[in-house]
Every structure is written in structure tokens, then in C-alpha cells.
């Protein structure tokens, strides 16, 4: 009787048939990705203008000076989105090692300049056309954050290396070379100056290895090494590492202790941002005080347009605005992992998982630090915070995800069956390659009664 019963439909089929019908369409992943990332970008531009307009007017006499720079970076990021959406997977695999090598070189120059300044070998962190300022490296008038480029390089290079090794990743020798030495060097160069980005890179590597099916004991070893490295980097801050100073308070340790201590025992120093951010969240209530009416923009909260912009969102848009942003990030996470599950190419699957893990982990660390659930690490909120390199690299990564969404088997068949106009393919994106034809499944024999003759023999 049990064999004749049909399987029960899923909950989405039972209660949300319209949503299930939309998600079942071939290009649903692509449209969900474009919609969620586009709305996050629009919200980010709006909040950056709201957080910087008063300060920009006071400093430069023009309330639009800061948002104008952000719009320029958004335009460059959309250009990167368009380019990455058009690139085939083999080109992305070839570019990975060059992007990672460029990031390592820029990080080495940045850390070298900061280290020479900390030991008084040079008066300022400047040598020739290179100048280092915290996380930024200026080459003449052009400023770039090498750690943002490193995230993209790790995704492309790591996905290519893991995809090439395939089943041999079960052996430690294959897993260790060349992945672990390069990743270890990258952690040192990034963590010297930016502990938060190092945590995001660690989450990214864990996502890649988890998708590849690596054994759990490898993650245990990575966890021990990661905690040891974080402890060393925290201790190195008191020796002048990154933005620390010799003989001064260890700012990395102060951030950790301020998180562990209750708010009533912490008033100034490392707790100032945290307390101001919580005050803004309390003031916002359910619907906020109104867009542009935040009091934090009057220099009451450092980095109100960057690391702590979620506090401005909470004060101006309230719980409703915060829930909208969280829901959009949840849709982005669902879409990214959905793309990774549906594509056939191992490189695309690994790269999609790495990009999604990177963006979601960074959003969780930033929002958790603002609301007091995690220590403050100084990470920007993807799409929302002000910043040039972070926004450009993020939109380029979304372009790669869009390319992978169009390469899903059902999406590729639908696009090739009814291709858009030629000018659309030239201006927007080319047709994805067709997947191999599906192999028919062999018929499954149903279990039934044994023949009478066999049963008689058994009875004998």
C-alpha cells in the first residue's frame, strides 16, 4: 500500500504555489540576483548621501561631494559587473592567478610602508609614488584597497585550483600544495593591517573546501590555526602592527574586551562607537526618525557612512528598514547558493559558493558588530557602506554570479531555444553554452512478489 502512495508535495507547493511557480522558471536565479543586489545598491547610495550630506556641506560647502564620489564608484562597479557577466568560465579561471598575484604585491607594499613607519625608518608611510594610509594604498592620485582585490583573487584562484584537483583533495599533500602556503601568506599580509578582512577570507576558504567535500578534520585543523593566527595578530598590534602603536593601548584587544564587558562598564575609547550605535538603534524604534534626520551625522559617530552605517539605517528607517536590508541579504544568500547547487561546472559551483560566503560573512560580521552581537572589526557593509574599492569589487563579483546563473542548465537551454535579439547579445551578454544532453535514466524495477515456482522451492 505504501508503494502506491504518491510523495507529498513540498511546503512551497502546498502553501505558496505562486512563489514556487516563479522559482521554477529557468531564469529565476538571474532575476532574483539582479533584483536583490540592485535594491541593496540603491539603498546604499541613499544612505551614504543621508550620512554624509551635512558633514560634506560643513567641510566643502557642497552636500553632494561625498555622494558624487560614491556614484562614480558605483558606475565603475556596474562596468565591472557588465564585463564579468560577459566573460566565460575559462577566462575567469585564467585571470585568477594574475588577480591574486597583483593583490599579494600590493599588500606587501602596503605592509612594508606601514612597518617602516612604525620603526621610524621613514618619517611617513610614503616611498616614491606609493603612500600607505591604514587600509589604503595610493599610487599617485589613485587609491585602492588591496584586501578587497585579494577576496576576488582568492575566489577565482582557489576555485580553479580545487576544481583541477578534484577527488585527489582527500590526500593532505594535494590539499596542502599550493593552497595552504599561498593562503597562509595572504592571511599574514592581510591580517597585519586588517583582522576583519582576514576573518572574511577564512570564511571564504572554509566555504570553498566545504563545497569540495573536504573531510571535517581539515576544518578542525584550520580552526586551530586560525585561532592561533588571530591571537598572534592581536598581540602584534601592541608592537605597532597595522594601525597600532608601540606602548599604546592594544586596539584589537580593546575591541574584544569591550564586546565581552557589559555596556554599563564601558564608556569611552573602544566602547564609544558601540554605545553610540546602540543609542541610534534605540532612538529609531519601529519606523525610524525619518530619512536624513539622524543625529549621528554631526560627528557623534565615527565612520557613520562606512563601518557603522547600519546604525544610521536603524535610526532613520527603524526596524522596518533593518528588516528590509536583512531580507535582501537573505535573498542574495539563497540565490547564490541556489546557483552553486544548480550549475554543472565544478569551477562555477565553487566560485559561486565562495562569492556568496564572502558577501554573507562580511554582512553578518558588520551587522553583528553594530548591534553588539559580535566584536567590532572595522568591516564595511557590502553595497551599503561608502567606499570605492569595496563597491567596485563587490559588483564585479555579482557580475560573475550573474554569468553563472545564466549558465544553469535550464537557463542555458531556455536562452538558446529563444535567443534574444542580436543587439541585446552584443550590448548585454552573449548566449551561454548549451549543457550536455541529459542521459535517460534506466527504468527502475518495482519490488514485487517472488514467482510461485521460486517460492515453492524455498518452502521445500
Image (cartoon, rainbow, N blue to C red):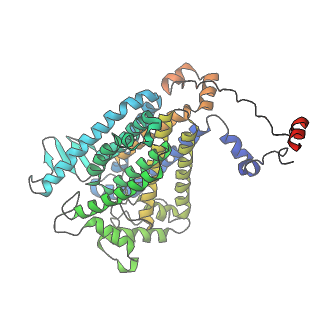
Q: Is residue 243 left or right of residue 324?
A: left
Residue 375, percent from left and from top: 38, 65
Q: Residue at x 32, y 51 (%)?
A: 62
Q: For the C terminus, which image quadrant?
A: top right
The residue lying at 21 percent from left, 41 percent from top is: 139
Whether residue 111 is visible here, answered yes or no, is yes
- How many numbered dots are placed on residues in this image? 0
* Front residue of 228 and 353: 228
Residue under the image location 86 percent in, 39 percent down? 450
Q: Could you say where residue 289 lies in the image, as x and y percent from the top left?
A: 50, 66
- What is the residue that sits farthest to the bottom in this orientation? 265
List x then y, in percent, for residue 180: 34, 45
Relative side of 336 to 68, left or right: right
| Residue situated in front as seen by the camera: 115 or 185 | 185
State whether residue 69 appears in this view. Answer: no
Residue reaching furthest to the top: 422
Is residue 356 placed above or below 420 in the rendered structure? below
**Closer to the camera, 220 or 375?**
220
The quarter of the picture where residue 171 lies is top left
Could you say which is closer to the camera, residue 460 or residue 102?
460
Q: Provide residue 200's location: percent of width, then percent of height.
A: 39, 52
Q: Quadrant of residue 422?
A: top right
Indicate the quadrant where residue 175 lies. Answer: top left
Amino acid at each position: 500500500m505504501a508503494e502506491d502512495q504518491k510523495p507529498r508535495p513540498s511546503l512551497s507547493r502546498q502553501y505558496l504555489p505562486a512563489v514556487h511557480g516563479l522559482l521554477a522558471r529557468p531564469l529565476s536565479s538571474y532575476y532574483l540576483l539582479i533584483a536583490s543586489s540592485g535594491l541593496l545598491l540603491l539603498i546604499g547610495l541613499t544612505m551614504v548621501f543621508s550620512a554624509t550630506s551635512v558633514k560634506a556641506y560643513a567641510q566643502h560647502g557642497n552636500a553632494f561631494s561625498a555622494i558624487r564620489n560614491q556614484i562614480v564608484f558605483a558606475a565603475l562597479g556596474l562596468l565591472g559587473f557588465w564585463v564579468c557577466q560577459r566573460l566565460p568560465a575559462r577566462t575567469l579561471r585564467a585571470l585568477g592567478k594574475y588577480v591574486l598575484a597583483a593583490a599579494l604585491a600590493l599588500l606587501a607594499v602596503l605592509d612594508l610602508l606601514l612597518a617602516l613607519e612604525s620603526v621610524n625608518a621613514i618619517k611617513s608611510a610614503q616611498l616614491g609614488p606609493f603612500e600607505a594610509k591604514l587600509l589604503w594604498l595610493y599610487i599617485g592620485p589613485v587609491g585602492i584597497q588591496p584586501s578587497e582585490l585579494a577576496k576576488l583573487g582568492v575566489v577565482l584562484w582557489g576555485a580553479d585550483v580545487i576544481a583541477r584537483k578534484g577527488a585527489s583533495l582527500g590526500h593532505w599533500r594535494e590539499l596542502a600544495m599550493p593552497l595552504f602556503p599561498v593562503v597562509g601568506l595572504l592571511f599574514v599580509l592581510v591580517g597585519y593591517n586588517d583582522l576583519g578582512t582576514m576573518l572574511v577570507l577564512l570564511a571564504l576558504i572554509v566555504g570553498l573546501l566545504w563545497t569540495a567535500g573536504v573531510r571535517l578534520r581539515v576544518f578542525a585543523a584550520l580552526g586551530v590555526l586560525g585561532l592561533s593566527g588571530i591571537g598572534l595578530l592581536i598581540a602584534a598590534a601592541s608592537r605597532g602592527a597595522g594601525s597600532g602603536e608601540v606602548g599604546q593601548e592594544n586596539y584589537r584587544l580593546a575591541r574584544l574586551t569591550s564586546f565581552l564587558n557589559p555596556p554599563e562598564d564601558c564608556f569611552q575609547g573602544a566602547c564609544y562607537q558601540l554605545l553610540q550605535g546602540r543609542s541610534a538603534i534605540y532612538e529609531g524604534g519601529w519606523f525610524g526618525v525619518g530619512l536624513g534626520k539622524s543625529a549621528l551625522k554631526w560627528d557623534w559617530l565615527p565612520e557613520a557612512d562606512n563601518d557603522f552605517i547600519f546604525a544610521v539605517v536603524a535610526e532613520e528607517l527603524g526596524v522596518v528598514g533593518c528588516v528590509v536590508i536583512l531580507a535582501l541579504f537573505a535573498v542574495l544568500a539563497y540565490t547564490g547558493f541556489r546557483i552553486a547547487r544548480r550549475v554543472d561546472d565544478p569551477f562555477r559551483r565553487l566560485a559561486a559558493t565562495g562569492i556568496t560566503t564572502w558577501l554573507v560573512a562580511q554582512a553578518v560580521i558588520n551587522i553583528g558588530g553594530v548591534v553588539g552581537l559580535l566584536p567590532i572589526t572595522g568591516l564595511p557593509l557590502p553595497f551599503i557602506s561608502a567606499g570605492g574599492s569595496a563597491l567596485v569589487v563587490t559588483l564585479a563579483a555579482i557580475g560573475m554570479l550573474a554569468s553563472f546563473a545564466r549558465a544553469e542548465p535550464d537557463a542555458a537551454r531556455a536562452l538558446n531555444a529563444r535567443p534574444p535579439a542580436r543587439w541585446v547579445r552584443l550590448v548585454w551578454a552573449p548566449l551561454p553554452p548549451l549543457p550536455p544532453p541529459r542521459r535517460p535514466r534506466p527504468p527502475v524495477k518495482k519490488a514485487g512478489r517472488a514467482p510461485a515456482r521460486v517460492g515453492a522451492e524455498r518452502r521445500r
